[in-house]
Image: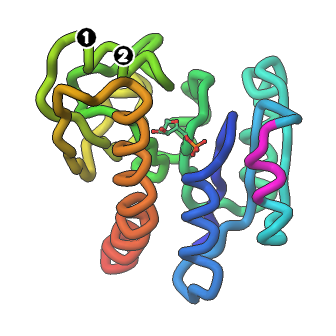
Amino acid sequence: KRLAILASGSGSNAEKIMAHFRHSDKAEIALIASNKSDAYVLERAKKFDVPTFTFSKKEMDAGVLLEKLQEEKIDWVILAGFLLKIPVELTRAFPDRMLNIHPALLPKYGGKGMYGAHVHEAVKAAGEKETGITIHLVNENYDEGKIVFQASTAIDELDNPDSIAAKVHELEHKYFPQVIEELLLKQEDQ
Ligand code: GRF
């Protein structure tokens, strides 16, 4: 299976996924694509010899990204810190084959604007006792795709958005690669 990872920022999740599949015979990270030509994720791709592709929102909306993914015969699209809304055509081209990771326990704290530190600020402000990660399939309504996996972590009094972010990142790095692998295996059985 050929996987493409879409990311807009640092790409720590992308790196964990590339490392996880580096010697795998089940899946290959065939492309790292970003809408930011200076995104650090592109540096991480170079370290793993994974081809990269950058595009603008305009190009994505015009179908350029979809063409590239089809050209590269991509089977799965993994969103790992990708901050643009995926065009409907793109979600339709990968039905049940596009995964996103959200740094909170959906359906709470999802939707517009709930990304990056904003999510952890909102969780802290609401006095939540726990938060976590949600890995879900991406459909046209974005954060409402089928939830595939969730893991939680406790929030205590002394936690602030930064320490919450660190706990959430730890869950992401621990679980995202293996959840992807298990999904690929399940799909193969079908
Ligand atoms: C992660 O917290 C992820 O949940 C969110 O964006 C962040 C990406 O972090 N969607 P990184 O770029 O993988 O370090």
Helix, strand or loop: magenta stretch = helix
- Point out the image quarter for the N terminus: bottom right
Q: Residue at x 52, y 37 (%)?
A: 92
How many residues crowd around disc 1 within 10 Å: few (fewer than 14), some, or many (20 or more)? few
Q: Which residue is mark 1?
A: 125
The amino acid type of the residue labelled 1 equals Ala
Mark 1 CB near ligand 1 (8 Å cut): no
Q: Secondary structure at mark 2?
A: helix
Could you tell whether 8 is left or right of 24 in the image? right
Label 1, label 2: how far apart the Cα atoms are: 6 Å
Is 20 rendered above or below residue 43?
below
- Point out the image quarter for the C terminus: bottom left
Q: Which residue is mark 2?
A: 121
Q: Does residue 1 belong to the magenta stretch?
A: no
Q: Are marks 1 and 2 in contact (CB under 8 Å)?
A: yes
Q: Nearer the viewer, residue 182 or 187?
A: 182
Could you tell whether 151 is left or right of 145 in the image? left
Q: Which residues are magenta?
A: 39-44
Q: Position of residue 28 (x, y in %)?
A: 64, 74
Q: Nearer the viewer, residue 125 or 132?
A: 125
Q: Position of residue 147 (x, y in %)?
A: 25, 43
The amino acid type of the residue labelled 2 equals Glu
Q: Residue at x 57, y 85 (%)?
A: 24
Could you tell whether 121 is left or right of 94 in the image? left
Could you tell whether 28 is left or right of 124 in the image? right
